[in-house]
Image (spheres, rainbow, N blue to C red):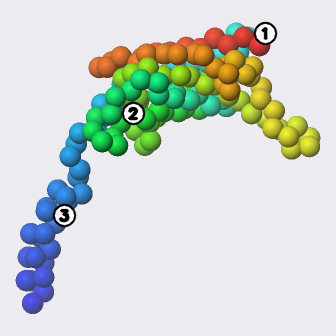
Amino acid sequence: MLARFFSIVMLATPLFLAACGGSGNGPQLASVSGKVTLDGQPLSDASVEFAPIEVEQVEEGVGGSGGNAATDESGKYTVRTGSQFGLQPGKYLVRIAKTSYDDDGQEMQQIPARYNTESDLEVTIESGGNSSLDFQLESE
């Protein structure tokens, strides 16, 4: 009886894994990384968001997503889309933000609005390669 159970499990496992594997037609991602500076100094602990402007969907509901990253102490970042590194080729609006809080707990943006809420930074990510995108921000 136990041998029959294991035989069924061994036969069913590949079918189950194949069904869970998906079609493999997900979007192809290009590696995107770079460095962010503010007034010539590395900007640490900032968020870098890539919001899609013109990005094609691979199939219904798949693809066309944006990506995001956080800068490290040297201002470097690497973009992720969901759980994967990279961005789908296309055109993106970039927003860079760094938030702190005052003594009253009020949120304060440390970067001028022209780089985040009023951003007009646009980039195009090409397919099949690595994109190194550095952003030199100015306070004034």
Query: Foreground mark, 1 or 3?
Result: 1
Image quadrant assignment for residue 5: bottom left
> How far, Cα to Cα, is label 2 from label 3?
29 Å
- Pick the residue in front: 90 or 132: 90
Tell me the SS state at disc 3. Answer: helix
* In contact (CB < 8 Å): disc 1 and disc 3: no
Name the residue at 77% across, 26% down.
Answer: 110
Q: Determine the residue positioned at 56% across, 22% down.
A: 94
- In the drawing, does residue 130 fall left or right of residue 95? left
Q: In which quarter of the image is residue 83?
A: top left
Q: Position of residue 46 (x, y in %)?
A: 66, 29
Residue type pointed to by label 1: Glu
Q: Name the residue under label 2.
A: 64
**Is residue 74 or residue 63 the one in the foreground?**
63
Q: How many angstroms separate mark 2 from mark 1 (CA)? A: 34 Å
Q: In which quarter of the image is the C terminus?
A: top right
> Height in image: 22 above or below 31?
below
57 or 20: nearer the viewer? 57
Report crowding for label 2: few under 14, some 14 to 19, many 20 or more residues within 10 A (C-alpha). Answer: many
In this view, 15 is above or below 39: below
Residue at 9 percent across and 90 percent down: it is 1
Q: Is residue 127 left or right of residue 134?
A: left
Residue tagged by mark 3? 16
Indicate which disc residue 77 carries.
none
Mark number displayed over residue 140: 1
Residue at the spot x=20%, y=46% of the render?
23
